[in-house]
Image (cartoon, grey):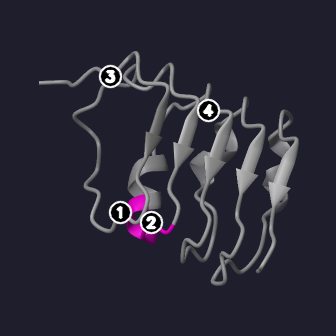
Amino acid sequence: MMLVVEKLEGISLKKCVNLPTLSQIGSKGFRNLRLVDLTEASPTTVENFIQGRNLNNVKWLCLKKCMIRKLPNDLFCWLQLQVLDLAQCQSLEKIPSSIGQLNALQELDLSRS
């Protein structure tokens, strides 16, 4: 059974540690999603949420205080992303050049404090 959450415009998974894969949500399930807050979520949660998702309409993504070492590759397909908050991501090793694919990106927060 596929879950459809078509009308969902925002989701907060703050401090989520054990998010399973979301394969039960169909490919169109998140088509209206605009805001995603993964503040302090575990690297596994970040990867499981972003991986394989067609989240082209997301405009704001918060990964503040996440312990991720790298940005998930699928993130660079989010063509409407305008704000990417990576503040206090102390484990983040580098920002890949593919971030240039995010043509709509207006704000990138890399602050450490």
The mark total stands at 4
Q: Earlier in the sequence, mark 1 or mark 4?
A: 1
Label 2 secondary element: loop
Name which residue type carries label 2.
Answer: Ala
Label 1 secondary element? loop
Q: Nearer the viewer, mark 1 or mark 4?
A: 1
- The segment highlighted magenta reads 40-45
Mark 3 or mark 1, earlier in chain: 3
Query: How dense is the environment of label 4, judged by Cα within 10 Å: few (below 14), some, or many (20 and up)?
Result: many
Q: Are marks 1 and 4 in contact (CB under 8 Å)?
A: no
Q: How far apart in space, not on screen, are marks 3 and 1 (Cα)?
A: 19 Å
Direction from residue 88 to residue 33 in the image, left or right: left
Give yes or no for contact between labels 3 and 1 (Cβ–Cβ under 8 Å). Answer: no
Three-letter amino acid code of the residue under disc 4: Val
Q: CA distance from mark 2 to mark 1?
A: 5 Å
Query: Does 63 appear in magenta?
Result: no
Label 3's element? loop
Q: Which labelled disc corresponds to residue 16?
A: 1
Amino acid marked by disc 3: Val
Mark 4 secondary-structure assignment: loop
Query: Amino acid type of disc 1?
Result: Cys
Q: Of the residues under marks 4 and 2, which one precedes in the sequence?
A: 2
Label 2: which residue?
A: 41
For label 2, the crowd category at 10 Å Cα-Cα, with few meaning under 14, some 14 to 19 and many 20 or more, is: many
Q: Which residue was labeled with disc 4?
A: 58
Q: Examine the rendered structure and indicate whether residue 51 appears above or below residue 112.
A: above
Q: Position of residue 38 (x, y in %)?
A: 50, 56
Residue at numbered disc 3? 5
Image side of residue 91 versus residue 82, left or right: left
